[in-house]
Amino acid sequence: MMMLELLNSPTQSYPSLFDVSDVEKALSCLKFGKAGGFDGLTKESIAYCHPVILIQFKILFNLICIHGLCLMTLALVLWYQLLKIDLVTNLCVSDNYRPV
């Protein structure tokens, strides 16, 4: 039995909340040419790699949802606050900043 058939079979040992098509759909919503995150991973990295990565992401997302745990490296996010520029910007109002 091929690996793909085994992972998508109804006899797998955990419930499948996400399918490979869900991962493909989410990947198609990402834009090309954007900067990578903390780990340097970009859409190009995933789009041009071997298709087995979609299966790995499917398993990862299912396990995260089933167990309610997320790796700290996946939860690491860097936020930068950029000031919305105009002539009368009040620096003390949080609405005048946008996250990047």
Image: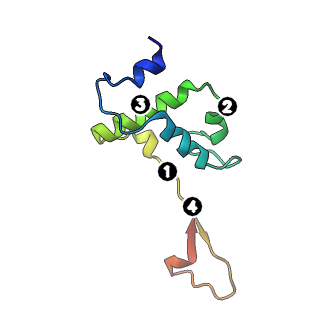
Q: Choose mark 4 or mark 3, whichever is in front.
A: 3
Q: Residue furthest bottom?
A: 88
Residue toward you, 12 or 97: 12
33 up-or-down from 19: above or below: below
Distance in Å between CA atoms under marks 2 and 4: 29 Å
Question: How would you rate the neighbour count of disc 2 (Cα within 10 Å): few for under 14, some for 14-19, many for 20 or more?
Answer: few
Q: Where is residue 86, by image quadrant?
A: bottom right
Marks 1 & 3, CB-CB < 8 Å contact: no
Where disc 4 sits, the SS reads loop
Marks 3 & 2, CB-CB < 8 Å contact: no
Marked residue nearer the N-terminal end (3 or 2): 2
Q: Amino acid at mark 4?
A: Tyr
**Quadrant (top left, top right, bottom left, bottom right) of the C terminus:** bottom right
* Residue 54, position as x, y percentages in the image: 52, 31
Residue at coordinates 71% horizontally, 47% vertically from top-left? 33
Residue toward you, 82 or 54: 54
Residue 80: mark in rendering: 4
The residue labelled by disc 2 is: 48
Q: Amino acid at mark 2?
A: Tyr
* Residue 15, position as x, y percentages in the image: 30, 33
Residue at coordinates 49% horizontally, 50% vertically from top-left? 77
Residue 77: mark in rendering: 1
Marked residue nearer the N-terminal end (4 or 3): 3
Marks 2 & 4, CB-CB < 8 Å contact: no
Q: Is 92 positioned to the left or the right of 63 in the image?
A: right
Q: Is 48 positioned to the left or the right of 22 in the image?
A: right
The residue labelled by disc 3 is: 59
Q: Is 4 positioned to the left or the right of 65 in the image?
A: right
Residue toward you, 57 or 37: 57
Q: Residue furthest front?
A: 10
